[in-house]
Image (cartoon, rainbow, N blue to C red):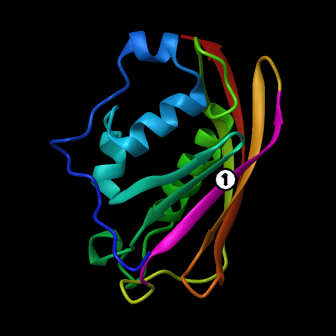
Amino acid sequence: MDEFTPPSLEASGVVPPEAAKSMSGLAMMRAIIEGRLPPPPMAATLEFAVELAEEGRVVFVGRPSFRHYNPFGVAHGGYAGALLDSCMTCAVQSTLEPGFGTTTLEYKVSMVRPMTEKTGIVRAEGKTLYVGKRSGTAEGRIIDAAGRLLAHGTTTCLIFSV
């Protein structure tokens, strides 16, 4: 993918409670990809979007830009953190039955290469490690178009009834 258009804030929203109760996590993620459910406002704000959802694996795509910079001229660590938090938590969500949701309890991120507006499109891939009745864990990686690792992380998520 050479081109990427982030979602607009006007088109964003939250998943309606009736959808969260009636759809599996994987169906919900796919509905967001297909435009049947709105992307979250956070994705519009930070200019990234979910690209692929499989059971236990979710990929987000984004393009770091000047608006993500810290005072030192590189994308703020929070950009990588938000991408990784999103892909890892959504990977856990993609395994859940209807009526269940997940939220981050904690996550750890390690940045290994800087991201700038010259980096181009990046992909953040989250994969589950463990999913139980009350919690799930996942790992994530952000890579650039050349396949170089930019950041990686792990998460623990709380699973709850919606």
Task: Quadrant for residue 94, please give it.
Answer: top right
Q: Is residue 147 left or right of residue 133?
A: left
Whether residue 25 is situated above or below residue 35 in the rendered picture:
above
Q: Looking at the magenta stretch, what is its main secondary structure?
A: strand
Task: Quadrant for residue 33, please give it.
Answer: top left
Residue 138 x %, y %: 75, 45
Q: Amino acid at mark 1?
A: Gly
Quarter containing the N terminus: bottom left
In the rendered image, the residue lying farthest to the left is: 10
Residue at x 67% of width, y 24% of height? 96
**SS category of the residue bearing label 1:** strand
Whether residue 71 is situated above or below residue 11 in the rendered picture:
below
| Numbered label tally | 1
The part of the chain drawn in magenta is 120-131
Residue 45 x %, y %: 28, 53
129 part of magenta stretch: yes
Dot 1 alpha-carbon crowd within 10 angstroms: few under 14, some 14 to 19, many 20 or more? many
Residue at x 28% of width, y 65% of height? 5
Residue at x 53% of width, y 47% of height? 86
Residue 151 x %, y %: 64, 71
Q: Is residue 137 left or right of residue 9?
A: right
Which residue is more in the foreground, 159 or 61? 61
Q: Which residue is mark 1?
A: 126
70 part of magenta stretch: no
Residue 39 x %, y %: 34, 41
Q: Is residue 102 left or right of residue 47?
A: right
